[in-house]
Image: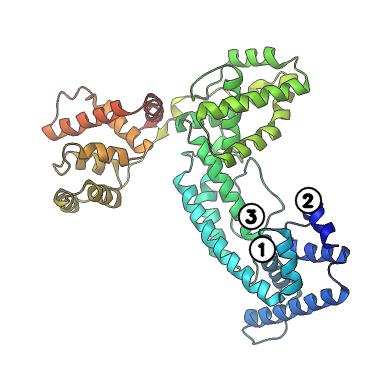
Amino acid sequence: MDNFIINKKGDFEDSLSKEHYFQSLVQVLHSKNLLKIKDIESIQLQVLNILKEMVGYYTKNKSSSLRVEIAEQIMLSVYYTLGIFLKSQPTMEESIALIKKKEIKYLFAQGEKVLRAKIDECQRLLEITKETRVKTENYAYIDTIDYGIPLFFKEYDPRFASQGIPGSIDYPLAISESYLVGIEYIEDYLNKVILENKFCSYFNCAEIEALLKGFNKDSNHMLINIFQLVLINYLGRILAGKEGRSLEITKGDRAYLKSMMKNLSQLEFKKLIFQAEEKLRKELSIRDKKLMEYINRTLCQVAPEIKKHIETDTLENIFITLNKSEENMLKYEDGESLEDSKFRYITEEIRDCSKVEEKIEIIREEFHSLKDLVDVFSADCIFDDEFIDIFKALDDFEVALLMVVISNDKVLDIDYGTESDKEWRGKFKEYLESLDDRKKEDIIKISQGIDI
């Protein structure tokens, strides 16, 4: 009978509930005669003993009575904790062996350890999500990352409600897994947001905002998935034979796409989408297998929509023309500048550093405004090629901000200003010239979408 389970592993796993994993696993094992009635009764008794202990913790042993709905919630939490440990096993055979040979209390204790590890991992994923976030004004996206998910960690109760999903997570993913609950839901959500952010990072943030405005002028207040809109528009450019990382699609592009695809069979259309997906991967030099799998799943989901818009002659609703009006410029608001005395103290500290890495660390920790960053370059505390190392340590958006500063001052020719001004601007120009063409083009595009 054990061989039957192993040989039919795929069918066996498919019959298990992702949400109620432990309960469904026990039921299936019983239906396959791998657990006898006496085994089921023993498991139930052990679970009830854990529940009794948990109720004692919940009431602090001050009461033996509890509202039914609270007791049911704690029972579901016990089941979820047991399930999350069994899911973590490398093979189904090992999960089955654990149920048959180990005490349920042992499985529960191990499940609590898995829960704690997942909470720590998800908090790390949230930091990555914040670091890679798309620069957008979409309210649901901002609110979910800044408030909704942090609220989950604040209110999540791994002991008495490990299956719960507190917080406020409104931003929709391109691909969501509705069967996941508890910390598994957050883990899946954050991993996917990071993939979506990574894809969007290939494109100019100002063009992404223009794309959202082209989709709908009130896109900031809509529950829309940014990644999916970006992916579809870039796919449209690939299909139209356009090169580069722009998201711009014109009326002429749509006319060409319609004429090219309107008479394709379903099989021919799928082949065309697959070829465009492969070209997309090469154009962006994507090596992340998980990202490509996510892109593939998303395109499989949206391909029928593209086909439908071709048939109804409404391609403008899926391949969007960017709205590049002035109001879509990304308005940069500078951080708070340091007081003069504090600024002078820090620049003295920077001047005394013998290593450029130490200077970079101080700049990163102490300066939180563009004004202070520009001023420190002219403060005679950074010398020669240290400027280049510091520019390399900046992210693309910060470099783009410096480009805007220089462009606004019209000093790219380095003809005036103090000697210190001339030095850092000259080094900045040298740094820009050292960049490869693609990276330089990306930074220039970012700078063009910033209004200081």
| Secondary structure state at the residue bearing disc 1 | helix
Residue 63 percent location from the top left of the image: 68, 86
| Secondary structure state at the residue bearing disc 2 | helix
Viewer-proximal residue, 374 or 88?
88
Residue drawn at the location 26% of the way across and 40% of the way down: 389
> Vertical placement of 320 versus 373: above or below?
above
Residue located beneath label 2 in the image: 10
Relative to 349, 113 lies left or right: right
Rendered image quadrant of residue 12 = bottom right
- Kind of residue sitting beneath label 1: Ile
Residue 172 percent location from the top left of the image: 62, 44
Residue located beneath label 1 in the image: 84
Residue 393 percent location from the top left of the image: 31, 42
First in sequence, mark 3 or 1: give its number.
Answer: 1
> Vertical placement of 338 versus 66: above or below?
above
Question: Badge 3, how many Cα within 10 Å: few under 14, some, many 20+?
Answer: some
Residue drawn at the location 34% of the way across and 33% of the way down: 400
- Kind of residue sitting beneath label 2: Gly
Residue drawn at the location 59% of the way across and 29% of the way down: 215
Residue 282 visible in the picture: yes
Q: CA distance from mark 2 to mark 1?
A: 19 Å
